[in-house]
Amino acid sequence: MSKANLEAVNVLFLSFSFRFMMVIKQAVERLDYLEVSYSPALLYVGARHQENKQFCIENFWLFKDSILYIWRQVLREKFTAKTEEEWISLLDFIIAGLTAGFRH
Ligand code: HEM
């Protein structure tokens, strides 16, 4: 891959990472309301994934496993069973919202 292509991929990756973290941040800020409804923003983001025709819902769940894998590696003993359980709940909620938006 050329240097220019690598830089373009890097920008895309950083941009996606930032937007991904915004979704996590928003979900954390809405923790008290998670049982009530998916935010319109979450549904919108899920729907945005439809634009990529190669995308399938399974990718969300694979991504969840990847995130948990990395956090387990990086945080080691700080990533307790309780912490993992809570993150699984939050990620499950986020992905359920993304899926609802994707299917809409
Ligand atoms: C928990 C899982 C995920 C979250 C929270 C998430 C979040 C987001 C957000 C916030 C955007 C930007 C939407 C916008 O600005 O309109 C986006 C776009 C996108 N996402 Fe995801 N995403 C997730 C999983 C994935 C996975 C697993 C893939 C691919 C395998 C993927 C591929 C894409 C693509 C291709 C775009 C469009 C990029 C662009 O147009 O710039 N996403 N995602």
Image (cartoon, rainbow, N blue to C red):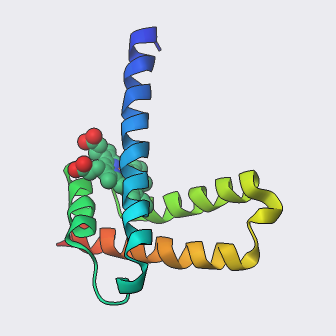
Quadrant placement of the C terminus: bottom left
Q: Residue at x 44, y 27 (%)?
A: 10
Answer left or right for 46 relative to 60.
left
Q: Quadrant of residue 72?
A: bottom right
From the viewer's perspective, is residue 10 above or below residue 5? below
Q: Residue at x 22, y 55 (%)?
A: 48
Q: Quadrant of residue 46?
A: bottom left
Q: Nearer the viewer, residue 98 or 50?
A: 98
From the viewer's perspective, is residue 28 above or below residue 33? above
Q: Is residue 18 visible?
A: yes
From the viewer's perspective, is residue 9 above or below residue 64? above
Q: Is residue 2 visible?
A: no
From the viewer's perspective, is residue 12 above or below residue 4? below
Q: Residue at x 38, y 28 (%)?
A: 11
Answer left or right for 7 relative to 52.
right
Residue sitting farthest toward the right: 77
